[in-house]
Image (cartoon, coloured by chain):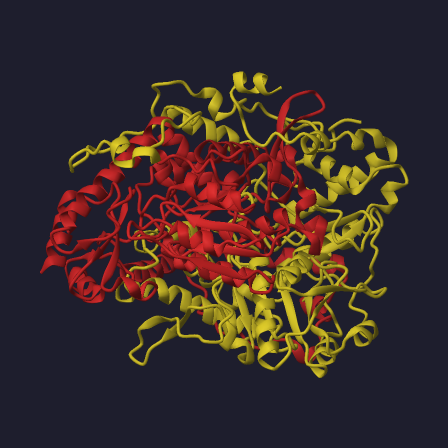
Amino acid sequence: MRYLPKSPADRAQMLREIGCKSIDDLFAPIPAEYRLNRDLKVPRQMAESEIIDYFHECANKNAADYALFLGAGAYHHYRPVVIDAMVSRGEFLTSYTPYQAEIAQGTLQAIFEFQTMVCELTGMEVANASMYDGSTGAAEAMLMAVRITGRTAAVVARSVHPEYREVMHTYTQHQGLPIAECGYLENGRVDMADLEKKITADTACVLIQSPNFFGTIEDVAAVADLVHKKGALLIVSIAEALSLGIVKPPVEADIVSMEAQSFGVPLGYGGPYAGVMATKEKFVRQIPGRLVGETKDKDGKRGFVLTLSTREQHIRREKATSNICTNQALIATMATIYLTIYGREGLKELAAQNLAKAAYAASAFAKAGKVLFAGAPRFNEFVVQTKDDPHTINKRLLEKKMIGGFPLGWHYPELGNAQLWCCTELNSKEQIDAAVQAVGQ
Amino acid sequence: MSNKDIKKATQHVNQNEGLIFERSSPGKKGYRLAPLDVPEVDYKKALGAAARPDLGNMPEVSEMEIIRHFTRLSTWNYAIDLGMYPLGSCTMKYNARVNEVVARFPGLANAHPYQPAEVSQGAMRVMKTLSECLLDITGMDAITLQPAAGAHGEMTGILLIHACLKSRGNPRKKILIPDSAHGTNPATAAICGYAVENLKSNSRGMVDVSALAAQMNEDVAGLMLTNPNTLGIFEQEIDKIAAILHEKGGLLYMDGANMNALVGKTRPGDFGVDVMHLNLHKTFSTPHGGGGPGSGPVACKKMLEPFLPKPVIVERADGTLAFDYDRPQSVGRVRMFYGNYGMHVRALAYTLANGPDGLRQTTEDAVLNANYIRKKLEGDYHLPYQSPSMHEVVFSDSIQEQKGVKTGDIAKRLIDYGFHPYTVSFPLVVHGAIMIEPTESESLEELDLLVDAMKAIAREAEEDPEFVKNAPHNTRVKRLDETAAARKPVLRWKPAAAKSAGE
């Protein structure tokens, strides 16, 4: 086996030195009746060239060069080549969690830069080193709000990503944490009157998404006012992080939970992505996950370490803030590199391009259907209601090598024949025009 | 004391580099956008009050500086690609480059999770094939690839147990966890609403079966067992352990963190485990990337299958694959979409590169390496448990501690010798634990270098303990002040003006 750096003679010598007759001696602790005396039923050992061929065949069965109009929590943006050039370096790729700070300063400094950028982007004061993704991060943010407030209920907007809501339900089902749902208005925003009714004296937090699942940007300040008046915390979840290039950050929130996939992370059929959690400084001891802090070595030189680990599972065990251990460090590094490449001006320009593409597309789609939620600003997604069933429309598009918008009927039957469309900098005018034509057929 | 015994590493010049924010100045650019082909929109007008005034302190740097910045940072890291990384329980094995190449094929890397099934068959086939491989490797009946990491898999597994017992009438109240377990186990049980009850190990470093029998009752939902356990010892009475649980209606969960000791040699499904997770980033070689991403598939017996997270992948009569969302008994989703798919691709590439013979040889070499280190260091370091070691060996610092040198000091000195340290102070059942897991990826030469280094440090601890206690001596930063970092946390960079204003 080509990964194993030992000759038969090496193995024989080592067994001799250990004092074993055969390798089987070392497996003697496994009771004989449980030893596997056959080959595993996995494909036979392959050459590298065969592995390449195998995955080429798999990859070629998927849509590769199709025009893509899907967003809904996973966004296609251009990935500068510098990202993979850097994260493919073995020192980033093949290192572990930076427990030994003296030989992990590269990872630690990169994460410190990531935490700083997340704070700048979200308007929060502290950010952690990453969560698994936006959905689990949102669930962990709710549990964090429960710890902070000591209250035991939550309100989640119906306009939050349906799969995020499912994950929140899974995480909280045994925590005695009932989740109430708050509706949305004609303009796509949170129904404030409904929200006011749903918040009780037990409500620990209200969780909204902005831009929400329909692409609508919420009035975060107004929601925050109401939530804070009732003594609850506001959690703002962000699925399309690029929006922060031009959309005002949710500074009024208490916790921001964000999916960083838009920042240079491949769509990759849904993962790996990276969740981000940011909050106010006063809540830092309740935040889950790893934190990197600045310190000095004994010669006074600046360095970085994992810190405040007394919150974590390896110290606190069942009383920890979370059970999270492995996070998404390499993906956070991808995001850091992406954010460095585009930076202060590029993120704004890129986000503005996204808004322009979606604005053009929405006006074009108005000829083929009814664009919903027109009364509030949106970023790069919008909802179109059509005469035809969205699945029929998507079949039509697929024949023309286009992947249409996300059908909403299953999660939002009240919207009828509606689809969520997404346009980014990668959707050309020609693609958009062709899609509109196919929808209107 | 000097560095004369250090064979593996030599100090060399490496570059200094500040924070990226300190390189930034207005007008520098690392990007250029393609021209916009639709009418421009004044976003400030479009967004109104929701428009962002500016992007604060986000950096402005050129592409050249970005390459230098991250390349320089990378050179400050130790990594598997540089040498042995014997971090016990973490299975730092070789991460094959072909895995990285295939995961970046456009048909896989650019696949949107919601694209229609008819243009996702290749992506789904990877998941299906990996699932079939993992099922035979574990001896289980059903599997989900959705959990994003080991601890996430634990949560999924315990939720399955909860749902299964609830369907039988009573989810029960407690989970038993051995004192040698990973911290994630008790934290997981707590998230799933269970109280944690500690289970003591016996003098051989294994579960005390009579204690288990005494603690087991109708309040106990299950036992979370790591096997081999964190002492690297196979639980030889595993059949009795399973029988005690099953007799009283409890279920056996196995933390698969140490599966690298078992693949191709024995199967948890055969020795009584009901549900377990695998760490693809350990046993199946997907890269750790400085702390993640991981992937923690959960495999289980037939009776737990109805409760698996949705969706599950199913094969239709015509041979096409689809996601089945119609799972009324499911515990729900544990993550959006289908998990860390990119890791599924890499783990399958690893499995194909090995085949059945390679997987077996891998396990044998991993166990051989650990036992070689044990044999060579026994005597220089105290071995608290005499039971046979599987893929890792746990010593203690009790000999060196007599001179005031602790496991953490030995670890720091090992850095000077060109190694990443072993796992320090874990498992908790061993005072001053030195937990070494070499994995199969080390040659005899590299193992001998580690043995020599550990022996040299043992001598240094005897002759000049202060020198060891002040290690590392050869790194770009010396021991860092962790107490100061925690007392007044500085978790982000701020511009000089803001810093002085805040102080």
In the picture as drawn, the residue positioned furthest to the right comes out as B402
Q: Position of residue B16 (x, y in %)?
A: 54, 22
On the question of residue B335 being in view, the answer is: no
Residue A240, can we see it?
yes
Q: Position of residue B188 (x, y in %)?
A: 63, 60
Location of the C terminus of chain A by quadrant is bottom left
Say which of B309 and A17 sits in front: B309
Q: Position of residue A305 (x, y in %)?
A: 63, 34
Q: Quadrant of residue A292?
A: top right
Residue A105 in which image quadrant: top right
- In front: A377, or A30? A377
Residue occupying the point 32% across, 59% down: B114
Q: Quadrant of residue B340?
A: bottom left
Vertical placement of residue A325 versus B408, above or below: below
Q: Colour of chain B?
A: yellow
Residue at position x 64%, y 51% from top? A150
Query: Relative to A256, is A150 on the left or the right?
Result: right
Q: Colour of chain A?
A: red
**Left or right: B203, with B426 as reference point:** right
The residue lying toward the viewer, choosing from B114 and B95, is: B114
Q: Position of residue B466 (x, y in %)?
A: 83, 29
Left or right side of B170 for B153: left
The number of numbered badges drawn on the structure is 0
Q: Residue at x 45, y 62 (%)?
A: A166
